[in-house]
Image (cartoon, coloured by chain):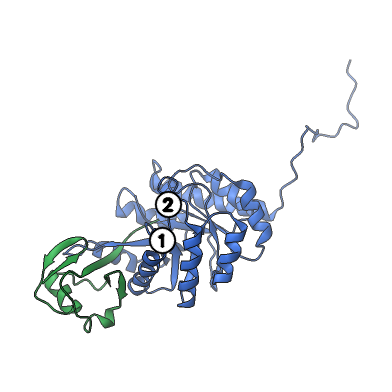
Chain colours: A green, B blue
């Protein structure tokens, strides 16, 4: 299926959020995820299933003011 | 200064963006003697764009205050706050909901709503607000125990544009920690904020974009400490006319 990851279309085979992150190489422990604008906690990634067209945001720590 | 039950000896909160290098940032943090730094969340790329910064944070003994910079809606800000809480492992959140693209003025209506939601969810909210007293009251009702009025637009370095508004805030909220967030350009601005009785100052660009950020970090620390000491020493009232400081009595007649 195709999902949008950080504004870029990506083809993935994984069906859960947890598996999708692995497949996409987004494996840092210091990331947070939001699916279609809703926060998905680390613990819930395994049980979160993805659908075609989902918008996934994967954020990491960055410098800020 | 006490923020959400945490006692701090430095009144400076320092932003971590825009430094020439990570090494300069580390030295600036050290020489500023700050105990709180601000951070953000941005999109991760494969390979871990945030990993190096994350590793750097692990070695620091300062507290982290993540922000919601760049958020324009309640929903964006609330979601970002949740993501920040998980990544940084802190209930502290610097809540920014930007309402105006040119001035980066906070959308105070969305700010109050987001503050209410986040406070109810256990966050300890540091709201980036204006000097408006009614907004300040609403934020406190929403659960905020700190207010962060702007000095001038973010990144402008214009100093304190509404001195009287900050003074009114101090008078209106005598017990609430007030931190001037945004607009500081020079050490004199930071000292002035302290002399007005503000509890702290949050700055980023003034240090990061100085010719020598490490030296400026040190200067800001000194300015804050001098300004606070001056406030506590109760400055004299201003006078309209000159008044001789040397006694007139006993002045010789030499004509």
Question: Could you say which is closer to the camera, residue B104 or residue B53?
Answer: B104
In the image, taking residue B28 as reference, residue A1 lies left or right, namely left
**Is A23 situated left or right of B79 in this image?**
left
Q: Nearer the viewer, residue B4 or A18?
A: A18
Q: Which residue of the protein is positioned furthest toward the bottom in this rendering?
A: A47
Residue B244, quarter of the rendered image: top right
Chain letter belonging to callout 2: B
Bin the neighbour count of mark 2 within 10 Å (Cα to Cα): few under 14, some 14-19, many 20 and up: many
Place residue B58 in its image quadrant: bottom left
Query: Measured along the vertical axis of the image, is residue B239 above or below residue B198?
Result: above
Left or right: residue A7 compared with residue B243: left
Residues at marks 2 and 1 touching, judged by CB atoms closer than 8 Å = yes
Residue A21 seen in the current view: yes
Q: Position of residue A22 (x, y in %)?
A: 14, 74
Q: Is residue B241 above or below residue A52?
A: above
- Secondary element at tag 1: strand
Secondary structure beneath label 2 = loop
Mark carried by residue B204: 2
Q: Residue under label 1, please give it.
A: B38
Instruction: Kindly identify which chain the residue marked by label 1 belongs to.
Output: B
**Nearer to me, A25 or B20:** A25
């Amino acid at each position: 299926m195709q999902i949008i990851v950080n504004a870029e279309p990506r083809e993935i085979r994984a069906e859960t959020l947890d598996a999708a992150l692995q497949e996409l190489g987004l494996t840092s422990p210091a990331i947070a995820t939001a699916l279609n604008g809703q926060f998905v906690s680390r613990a819930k990634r395994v049980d979160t299933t993805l659908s075609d067209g989902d918008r996934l945001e994967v954020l990491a720590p960055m410098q800020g003011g | 200064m006490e923020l959400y039950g945490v006692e701090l000896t430095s009144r400076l909160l320092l932003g971590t963006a825009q430094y020439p290098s990570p090494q300069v940032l580390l030295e600036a943090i050290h020489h500023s003697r700050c105990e709180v730094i601000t951070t953000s969340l941005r999109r991760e790329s494969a390979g871990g764009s945030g990993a190096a910064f994350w590793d750097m944070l692990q070695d620091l003994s300062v507290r982290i205050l993540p922000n919601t910079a760049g958020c324009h809606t309640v929903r964006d800000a609330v979601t970002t706050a949740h993501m920040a809480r998980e990544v940084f492992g802190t209930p502290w959140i610097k809540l920014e909901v930007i309402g105006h693209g040119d001035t980066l003025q906070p959308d105070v209506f969305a700010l109050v709503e987001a503050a209410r939601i986040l406070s109810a969810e256990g966050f300890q909210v540091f709201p980036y607000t204006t000097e408006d007293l009614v907004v300040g009251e609403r934020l406190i009702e929403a659960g905020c125990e700190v207010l962060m009025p702007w000095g001038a637009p973010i990144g402008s370095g214009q100093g304190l544009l509404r001195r009287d508004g900050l003074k009114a805030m101090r008078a209106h909220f005598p017990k609430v920690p007030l931190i001037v967030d945004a607009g500081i350009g020079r050490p004199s601005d930071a000292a002035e904020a302290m002399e007005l009785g503000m509890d702290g100052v949050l700055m980023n660009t003034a240090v990061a974009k100085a010719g020598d950020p490490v030296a400026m970090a040190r200067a800001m620390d000194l300015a804050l400490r001098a300004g606070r000491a001056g406030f506590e020493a109760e400055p004299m009232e201003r006078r309209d006319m000159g008044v001789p400081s040397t006694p007139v009595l006993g002045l010789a007649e030499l004509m």
